[in-house]
Amino acid sequence: MTRSNPSAVPRRAAPVTVAELLHLDVLTEPELVAGEAGASARVSSVRHAERLADAVDVRAGTALVLGGEAVSGGWAVEMALRRAWERAAACVITPAGWRVVESTRRLADRLNVPLLMAQYGDAAACAVALTTLVMQPAATRTQIIATVARNLAASPRNPRALVGVLNRHLPSTDAALLAPDRTVLSGRGVIVDRIAELPLIHGRHQTAAGPVVVQPVHGPDQRVVLYIVAALPRRAGAWLDTVTDALAIAAAPVGSWVAIERLTAERDARLRSALLAELLARADTLGEQTAEQVAKLGWRLDGWHIGIHLVLVSPAEQQTLLARTPTLTSDLADAGIRGPVVERADGWSAWVDYDEEPSPRTVDRIVGQLRKVLAKRPADLLLAAGVGQLGVGISGLRSSLSTAREAATLAVTAGPGTVEHSGDLGLRRLLAAPLGSDGFCALAGRLLDPLVGGEDDALLDTLTAYLDSGCSSSEAASRLRVHRNTVARRVERAVDLLGISLDTPEERLALHLACHAVRGGPQAPLPGS
Amino acid sequence: MGEAVAAPITQIGVDDIEHLVLGAQLVSSGGATIGTVPSAWLRRTLAGAGPVRLVPVSDLSPETLCVPVGNVGSPTVLEEKLPAGEEFVHAVRGIEDRLGTPAGAVAALDVASINALTPVIAAAQLGLPLVDADGMGRMFPLIELTVWAAAGLPASPITLVNTHGDVITIDCADNQRIESLARPAIIALGGWCAAALYPMNAATLARHGIHGSFSQALRLGRTLAEAQERGSPRGADLARELGARLLFTGAVVEVSRPTAAGFARGVVVIADRTDPDRMLRLEVQNECLLALVDGRVAAAVPDVICPIEQGSCLPVGVEQLYYGQVLDVLCFAADPAWHTPEGLALAGPAAFGYPLPNEAPPGDQR
């Protein structure tokens, strides 16, 4: 059971410090000219002085607001500073319009009396405004949070507007919206320097230049997708609490923006995928509704098409697929491959349109560009691709995309970054059917399971090399760089484990296909190399 | 001021010019430095006429007409628009004609800057004695800022004479209006002119005025010259020998002179070399007006604030202050006549735009 300390003042009601006068939006364009070391002093009362004589008996902890004769020159401010120091006043506040020279600055620094400059014409009015703040600090701080909340609620739901609310209503604070890799999505870029050494962890952090508040934003799946970060100046005092609260309030609308964006992207992707699937399944004529949607998306169905199919080498989540579509689309466009890019179960379908029949050189160029794009994929998103036959009209698009898919199936077995053109496949096209069939691959995997993960990883590789060499132990041995006897021994062991024989051509063919399905083609790297 | 009782100075000759110049610059409170023309003029005059007799006012019979003289207008113009030679003679003659009385002695409007030399020139040219007295005790920018005006004595009749011998005589009952009448006249006359003003008999002068001014200037000048030659003393010791107090020693770190409407108010900041956070703030216009150290008033007009360059031991005018210059800043207390309510109303800090709160006058810490 915890006991609350009755003498502890809740932070919201803590007395105002000089530094906070700069933040709490009571002074217009305030500036701390000198005497920063004294800025954490508490302000307990306010006094205004129109003549230097008025400052003679100022009380301790007072903010002295100068006007009239008392600010007729820097010399008067220096005398006020001296007086403030002698009487332990909190600070001296002056309007703009007098020249600051070195002696004034040094004096304030030396005496640790903060010297503030602000825009005001009437010192008495300024003093009254400050008095309200000083007497009721909690009310003022709460008011700022209420203002922030109100403006967030009324703001358009985009990051720029939302972070803009924070930057507008939290004076002397820089706020920004960051991606987990610290890219600034919106807000003040200066924040990057302030967080250079910091981990992006929820909470408050102290840096040499002042405190930093990190507020994570969660996506619909409860994972952190973005960070709202605010950097404060030194000696923020209770202002830090205000900023922390404001950021916590802003997390909700930013989170809802993320959710909406994601849902929109998913819906658009589903729409595209569904539309394409319908196009590929139907006959040559389109229904009215389909035609309308196609037109809305800007897809051309007449004319010549070259279809492309991109496949993920290792499976990824649908979320990741969706997230990568924009980057992929723009990279393809940069490489001169401009056309629709539609999400599929295993990757993407894309195609390029032409008014007239393109030359074979065009197709070759596309294959080359595609190779370059694939080479630049990040490690967690490796792709292989296939380019289909030329086709014209809807049926041409259909056949081009399906031949592209066949080519992609074979490209995957050759390893990431491979691009196969269906025209080059030749007989290998036949392999696309089994190797592209999930059922076949699963069956092959089950069949060859005894060879995989055992104490001898080389069994599957040796068997594949043996079959690749047309059942020649010596050729397989030279490929694998082992002794002929090693090959023979391993093949015998494999056959034994599988419980099969290599006597008939059908068995050999079936086994050969199964090995390729499980292990990939001859170019695939050997395990351990 | 001045400890040992030295032998009274009874004349001013060619050999005294150097000391007179130095002393005059000391009490000018950073005002204009003396150029070559006035010194040359004085040298030439004394070489021809011989030394001038310097007398205390008590040596004169009470009804003797004493005519204070001085240069008014811009001393810089004087360097270019050279004097014809007889300007001060004409000025004094103008007063004599106006009053119908011959002058018996020449006095000084002030003994600061070139106005320490011009009365000597006048006295030499007129063959009259020079009274050891002046009206300001330092340099002030306006004609009506004299202890005579503070005592209610009229400045007029005033005669103004230029290099062409043109004469303008001003009669004005109210000293407050003198400036507005005299300034345009001085400009019309060419920028500078010889002036004879505040004529009074010796009895009045004995009662009102700052006495021993020329003796004082000569003594100060001699002390300063010796200090220059010997290379010491400096700082507080020099101040003591001169009868002043040392406000501050340091190097100039900021010279700020904006062009504002009217007279240009400037600020000069001097930092203590051993404790660079400790600073002297000097408010200047044509002269030094106010000195603050750490936000406290160290000295203020009418007291004389005089910066002396440490190395050369020369008084420095405000126009010549520059970054890095090492200075001893001295303060000479003004004549007690200035520290009366009338005096302060005319020439105190408030009159120059510095409404200081009532605190103990800084000169009391002597």
Image (cartoon, coloured by chain):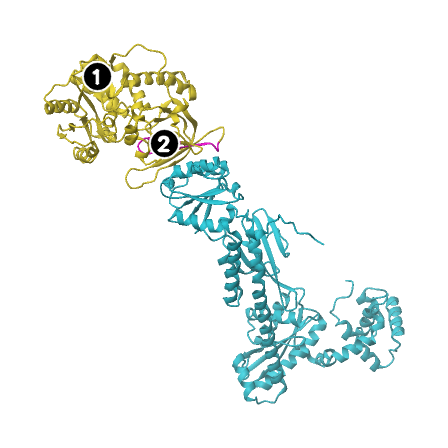
Chain colours: A cyan, B yellow
Amino acid type of the residue tagged 1 in the rendering: Leu
> Where residue A205 sits: x, y (%)?
61, 51
Element type at mark 1: strand
Q: Are marks 1 and 2 on the same chain?
A: yes
Provide the residue designation for mark 1: B130
Verify whether residue B280 appears in magenta: yes
The picture places residue A334, in percent across and down from the top left corner, at 55, 68
Secondary element at tag 2: strand
Whether residue A15 is in magenta: the answer is no
Q: Is residue B232 above or below residue A187?
A: above
Tell which circle, 1 or 2, labels the residue nearer the N-terminal end.
1
Residue drawn at 89 percent across, 71 percent down: A493
Q: Which residues are magenta?
A: B276-291
Whether residue A354 is visible, yes or no, is: no
- Category of crowding for the residue at label 2, using alpha-carbon neighbours closer than 10 angstroms: few (below 14), some (14–19), many (at least 20): many
| Placement of A100 over or under A143, stated as above or below | above
Residue A6 x, y percent position in the rendering = 63, 49
Which residue bears the numbered disc 2?
Answer: B290
Q: Nearer the viewer, residue A304 or A54?
A: A54
> Which residue is at the front of the view, A37 or A319?
A37
Image side of residue A263 versus residue A526, left or right: left
Which residue lies most toward the top here? Answer: B7
Quadrant into which the N terminus of chain A falls: bottom right
